[in-house]
Structures are given as structure tokens and as C-alpha cells.
Image (tube, rainbow, N blue to C red):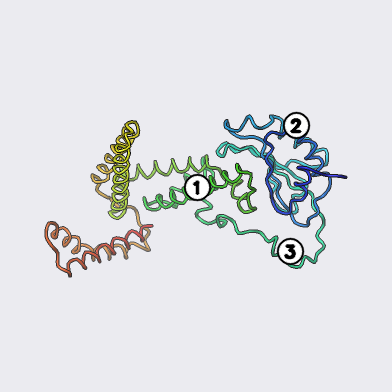
Amino acid sequence: MSVSGMALKIRESTESDTFDLAGANVATIRANVSAAFAEPFPISHMVRITFLTGGGKLCRSKYDDGAARAIAASLREHGFEEDHGASCVPECAGLYKAQHDTGKNLRTMVVFPRIMESTGDSGGADEDNAPSKPILELNSPDYMLAVAGFTTTFPRMVGSKCASWSQKRNAASSLEATNSQLKDMTEKLYSGTPLEDNEQEFFDATSTEDLERKLAYIRKEMGAQLEAGNVTFGERRILLEQVTERMQTIEANIKEATDENKPVKVKKLREALSKVRARKKTANSITPKGVTVPLRHREKIDALRMEARPLNALEASGKGRLMSLKETQAIGRRDEIMDKIEELYE
């Protein structure tokens, strides 16, 4: 059977690849898919063939509405079956699945082709085709946060594993980093660059929409915990440092926008500055009540607090005067103690 054009490029894939069907009509899609998958691929390892079949408002008009149905119909003619649980392993040869991720604004059709039987002696090929390292280590805290179901598992996880404000802050940082990675992968797909196998597995496991819902939830929980005073002195200090830094950044941006004569931007920045100042005022007015500490850390924390008491008094008495070198060193020790206490709370 003679194969050319896109069908030939598909069949020549020795690694997972992505093909953008923008501008292709149903007849062209059916012809290429049928020619590409009529026979097993001449490889002994599984690959993932991904077709971009649609997207959000910005690119929806580029794709034929029947693109996904055309792929499915052609595959079924050659005995392929749909399986939403299919993945990039030899056991899934001859399967396909449609995916619609509203968070990423992408519609795709993923195909796992039939492949040739392995000859057994692959030399160094086993190393070349070895599974790549996952983006997030399976069952790690970062992974569990990313894939946990939002309506069921995630709230319980936050309640049991992220009791302190610092733990919630660390969880939010993890989700932000994961979300940034997903957005980079989305841009990669939009540019027509195929994802690596480990990237695709990660891409399929969650979505930016889901991660942003989790971030909104955990930030709301952090705010409620802060207003209730269920934070440590160290946590309040961190928050105040963050807010102060944010205020300085906004003030610098206001000056720049004023110099550039951008009144609309200045107005928005002043509104943002007002909110940040209110947040700082709230943080300053809070008297930390502390949080429940695991028994295994309580004795250490109590001992550190006892050590810090005279140093706190020294810092308070030293305001408005020049401290001696010995007093300055003692205050430095006090900061180390507070950092250690914060670590034991996490």
C-alpha cells in the first residue's frame, strides 16, 4: 500500500508525536488516518499519536467540526476501539481516546497504533525506550495535590495534611509551580511541538482549570486562618514581609506609569495598593494564637520559646537606641530561634 503526505509522516513516527489538523477537511482527515493506521507501525515500542482537532474561541474556526468523528470512523474501520483509560504501553495497541480539556482549551484525539512484535534482542534499544522520569514523582505531596479530586479528596487533604498556615502556603506554591508547567506544555502543543511521554502523562492527569480551583480554595482557607489568628508569630512575620515587598513593587510601578502618563494604569495600581495596605493593616492587628502542634515537636518548641523570651525583651528595649555588638548578636540568635520554631510547625 502506497502511503504519502501526512499519512507517511504519521507512519514514520518513532517517538510520540502531535499532528495539527487545522485547515484539514473531513475527507482529507479520513484518507490520511485510514492510510496511516491500516497496518502496524514498523516499530517494536509503543508511541502516542495525538491529533489536535479543535480548541477555544481563538482557534475554533481553524478546525472542521467533524474532525474527531472522522478520525474515530476511520480507526473503527481498521478494528480500533475507543478506551478512555488507554495509555502509552504496548498492551494498548489498537486503542484510541478523545479528550476535551476546558482548562487548556484543547480538543485532541489520541491514538495508540498497532506495532510490530519485538524480536527480543533489542541491543541498546531498551535503554532508548525506557520510560522517562515522571514530571512529578508518583505519590509525592506535589503529585497528590495536583491529581486529588477537587470535590472530595482535596478539601480533606488540606484539612489533615496542611493544618498550619505555612503548610497551606507551601501547598499553594506547589500548585502554582505545577500550573506553570501545564501552561508551558499547552503553549508547546499550540506551537505544534509534540510532548514527551512523561509530559503527556502529566498533561492528561490534571488541568489548569482544576489547579486554579484548588489554588482559590487554599488561598481562601489561608485568609480565614489568618483572620482567626490561627498563625504563629513567625508566619505573621513572613506575611508582613511579603505584603511590604508587594507594596514597594506597586509603588514603583505607579511611579513608572505616572512618568509615562498612563492615568488608567495608575488608577488600577492605586486600587491594588489600597487593597495591599488594608491587608497589611489586618495582618498587623492580628494577635497570633498559634496552632495545634504535634506532640513530638511540642517540647522542642516550648524550649525554644523559653530561650527566645529574654531575647524578645532585649529587642523591645533596644528600639530607638544603638545596640552593642553583643546585643546585635543576641538578636540574630533570636531570629534563628523563630525560624527554627516555624520549621517545627510545618
Q: Label 1 is placed on what type of residue?
A: Ser
Per the image, the residue denoted by label 2 is 26
Which is in the foreground here, disc 1 or disc 2? Answer: 2
- Which quadrant does the N terminus fall into? top right
Does residue 46 lie above or below 72 as drawn?
Answer: below
Give the quarter of the image for residue 56: top right
At numbered mark 2, what does the secondary structure look like: helix, strand or loop? helix
Q: CA distance from mark 1 to mark 2?
A: 35 Å
Residue lying at 47% horizontally and 48% vertically, measured from the top left: 175
Where is residue 304 drawn, in percent x and y?
A: 27, 65
Q: Nearer the viewer, residue 156 or 150?
A: 150
Residue lying at 75% horizontally and 47% vertically, measured from the top left: 9
Does residue 156 lie above or below 107 as drawn?
Answer: below
Q: Earlier in the sequence, mark 1 or mark 2?
A: 2
Residue at the farthest right position: 1
Mark 3: give few (<14), some (14-19) or many (20+) Cα within 10 Å: few
Query: Left or right of 237: which side holds 74?
Result: right
Give the quarter of the image for residue 251: top left
Q: Nearer the viewer, residue 8 or 326?
A: 8
Check if mark 3's residue and mark 1's residue have beta carbons within 8 Å.
no
At numbered mark 1, what does the secondary structure look like: helix, strand or loop? helix
Where is residue 303 drawn, in percent x and y?
A: 27, 66
Q: Label 2 is placed on what type of residue?
A: Val
Q: CA distance from mark 3 to mark 2?
A: 37 Å
Residue at the farthest bottom position: 326
Q: Earlier in the sequence, mark 3 or mark 1?
A: 3
Residue 180: mark: 1
At numbered mark 3, what does the secondary structure look like: helix, strand or loop? helix
Q: Nearer the viewer, residue 20 or 304?
A: 20
Per the image, the residue denoted by label 3 is 125
- Which quadrant does the C terminus fall into? bottom left
